[in-house]
Amino acid sequence: MKHVKFISLFSFICTLLFASPGMTSLYPLSQTFNVSINGLPEPSEIRAVTIWFEVSNDFSFDNLTLGDAIPTGESGQVLGWEIDKAAVTHHEGKRVFKFGVYDQDDAFLDHPFNLRNGTIVSFDYDGTIVDLALVQFGVAAGVNIADRFRTASLGPSGVNFAPVPLPPSALLLMAGLVGMATIKRKNN
């Protein structure tokens, strides 16, 4: 009986502590930043990516390049993808760095060149990346499937996305609820 109470209490405390870790962090550096994605089934259905970062007033970027997640041909040339509208601008009172990458041949081909696992883009920057403001992963017909992904990490050298698994905090919460239900049943 004491073990069940301890496990329930431990599960509840862990859920409170780890259920929603904050993403907001300040990273003032001058280095290369990578935007990556992992855990995609291949071939994936993703044909476009749009990302906005909230940045500091002194933020600047250079050398925004496509990474190894972008499909290439046998000779290494990029197949249909390009960077769209990379800019630092203001949105809703915040300074943002926004860019998109997409398969420009998507509308013309029966078999578009979809995103793979790896680095989507990389860029050099000075200043501070404050937070991830917006993420969209587009599939056919412009449907956004960003809710299927989570930000696995956001740090000074990059951000990584992965498909959303059942979070460990949900498992801990379920274990706690089962434990409390068991205690209530035994007390009655």
Image (cartoon, rainbow, N blue to C red):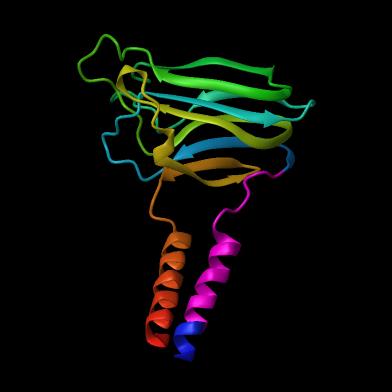
Q: What residue span does the magenta drawing correspond to?
A: 6-25
- The residue at 27%/20% (across/down) is 112
- The residue at 38%/55% (across/down) is 166
Which residue appears farthest toward the right when viewing the image? 58
Which residue appears farthest toward the left when viewing the image? 110
Q: Where in the figure is residue 73, as x and y percent of width and height? A: 30, 23
Which residue appears farthest toward the front when viewing the image? 188
Question: The C terminus is located in which quarter?
Answer: bottom left
Is residue 171 toward the left or the right of residue 129 in the image? Answer: left
Picture layout, residue 141 above or below residue 146: above
Q: Main secondary structure of the magenta part?
A: helix
Q: Where in the figure is residue 10, as x and y percent of width and height? A: 53, 76
Q: Is residue 48 magenta?
A: no
Report the front residue among 95 and 32.
Answer: 95
Is residue 106 toward the left or the right of residue 3 in the image? Answer: left
Q: Is residue 22 magenta?
A: yes
Q: Find residue 49 and report its image quarter.
A: top left
Report the front residue among 138 and 126.
Answer: 138
Picture layout, residue 171 above or below residue 134: below
Q: Where in the figure is residue 182, as x and y percent of width and height? A: 38, 80
